[in-house]
Image (spheres, rainbow, N blue to C red):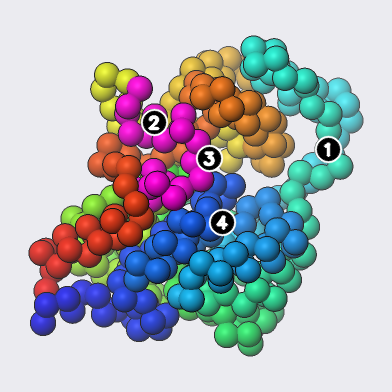
């Protein structure tokens, strides 16, 4: 039967037309992009990283104004010290390697903030009150009580695994689906059982092992950017393919022009997007992006990044000013290994091309 690939455990559970998911972009999600993907028959996700309760409430309302279809709200589970307060001299030591960039851009050095991230419990309550069709999490396993609370309001729960062991832990906790994220993926490595540097499994190896290990639907993420990738993921046993980088450059995305043009390779002779790297220097946690001058200088400086979330907060100041100036050398350029495959277009056009292309490849 033509189009049978569209009918999976996940599309049935959520009433989606297509097993195609827009990944969350903490700090870079846009209501327009999330709604466009859900309206096109896929499942749009929205990253709530750094959002306080009021902003979460407003975002959920805005999403509902733009789509009547299911969407995902995504949170980072707290792990480690979320608010590492320190004395002035230690804070200055964290700031020191980045001071040249503040000077270069002519921006004032920041002082230690009262807190780096909103309170997680308040974020969680706001998400619960928003009652999205799906809540997804990274960097850990939601607690039994959190899963129960979400289920009691009709919200399904998705966890994210970088290894089979993490997938097993999530399934044992009672999540409804697991995202398998291969080391090709753009953005952070969301490992929680072992160091991310020791959890670098490629998607082709991870998906079938996870499908065999858990009895909930698996969503494949990492390095998928066209119909060939979607068909491959489904053939490996995944119930959906999740794309990040390919949607990040879409017209509706909140990405800066400087970041987008580096992914599209427009400001270089060749595709420097081909050589993405994993680094801790932009956020304090391991994440994949396109290397630039700031990264090369920091990597060879002999200094260490401040811990997460301090490094993320510090570099955000530099990034905001660099984005304003259109300078892609002084900002994180998150992107996955499939970046050279992507091009700018409307999200609905991309979803349509993925659906038609997969129709040609799979029954
Ligand atoms: C800029 C950026 C931000 C991201 N932020 C999040 C996030 O906050 N939460 C999350 O679950 N995944 C996040 N991801 C991962 C994506 O949702 C998706 O799984 C990943 O990009 C898939 O790999 P691909 O980029 O190779 O398609 C992010 C990815 C990027 C590129």
Mark 4 C-beta to ligand 1 under 8 Å: yes
Alpha-carbon distance for marks 3 and 1? 23 Å
Sequence order check: which comes first, mark 4 or mark 1? 4
The stretch drawn in magenta includes residue 264: yes
Alpha-carbon distance for marks 2 and 3? 23 Å
236 and 102: which one is in front?
102
Give the x, y percent position of residue 352.
25, 61
The residue under the point 63% across, 53% down is 49
Give the x, y percent position of residue 37.
40, 63
Q: Which residue is mark 1?
A: 113
Q: Are marks 4 and 3 in contact (CB under 8 Å)?
A: no
Secondary structure at badge 4 equals strand
Classed neighbour count for the residue bearing mark 4: other residues with Cα under 10 Å, few (<14), some (14–19), many (≥20): many
- Residue 62 in view here: yes
Query: Which quadrant, please, contains the C terminus?
Result: bottom left
**330 to the left or right of 354:** right
Q: Which residue is mark 3?
A: 286
Q: Which residues are magenta?
A: 246-267
Secondary structure at badge 2 equals helix
Q: Are marks 2 and 3 in contact (CB under 8 Å)?
A: no
Q: Which residue is mark 4?
A: 47
Alpha-carbon distance for marks 4 and 1? 23 Å
Alpha-carbon distance for marks 1 and 2? 32 Å
């Amino acid at each position: 039967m033509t189009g049978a690939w569209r009918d999976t455990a996940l599309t049935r559970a959520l009433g989606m037309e297509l097993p195609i998911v827009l990944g969350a972009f903490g700090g870079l999600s846009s209501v327009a992009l999330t709604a466009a993907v859900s309206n096109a028959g896929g499942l749009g996700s929205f990253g709530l990283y750094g959002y306080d309760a009021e902003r979460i409430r407003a975002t959920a309302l805005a999403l509902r104004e733009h789509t009547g279809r299911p969407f995902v709200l995504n949170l980072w589970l707290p792990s480690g010290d979320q608010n590492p307060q320190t004395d002035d001299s230690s804070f200055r030591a964290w700031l020191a390697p980045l001071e040249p960039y503040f000077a270069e851009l002519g921006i004032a050095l920041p002082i230690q903030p009262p807190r780096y991230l909103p309170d997680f419990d308040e974020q969680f309550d706001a998400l619960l009150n928003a009652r999205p069709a799906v809540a997804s999490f990274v960097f850990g396993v939601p607690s039994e009580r959190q899963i129960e609370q979400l289920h009691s309001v009709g919200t399904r729960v998705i966890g994210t695994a970088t290894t089979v062991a993490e997938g097993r832990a999530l399934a044992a906790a009672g999540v409804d689906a697991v995202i398998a994220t291969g080391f090709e993926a753009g953005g952070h490595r969301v490992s929680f059982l072992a160091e991310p540097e020791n959890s670098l499994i490629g998607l082709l190896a991870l998906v079938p092992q996870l499908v065999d290990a858990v009895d909930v639907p698996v969503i494949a993420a990492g390095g998928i950017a066209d119909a060939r990738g979607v068909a491959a993921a489904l053939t490996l046993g995944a119930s959906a393919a999740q794309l990040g980088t390919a949607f990040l450059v879409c017209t509706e995305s909140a990405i800066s022009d400087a970041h987008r043009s580096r992914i599209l390779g427009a400001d270089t002779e060749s595709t420097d997007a081909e050589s993405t790297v994993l680094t801790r220097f932009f956020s304090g946690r391991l994440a994949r992006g396109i290397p630039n001058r700031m990264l090369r200088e920091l990597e060879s400086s002999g200094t260490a990044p401040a811990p997460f979330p301090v490094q993320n907060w510090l570099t955000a100041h530099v990034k905001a000013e660099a984005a304003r100036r259109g300078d892609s050398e002084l900002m994180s350029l998150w992107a996955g290994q499939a970046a050279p495959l992507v091009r700018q277009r409307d999200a609905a056009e991309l979803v349509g091309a993925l659906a038609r292309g997969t129709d040609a490849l799979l029954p």
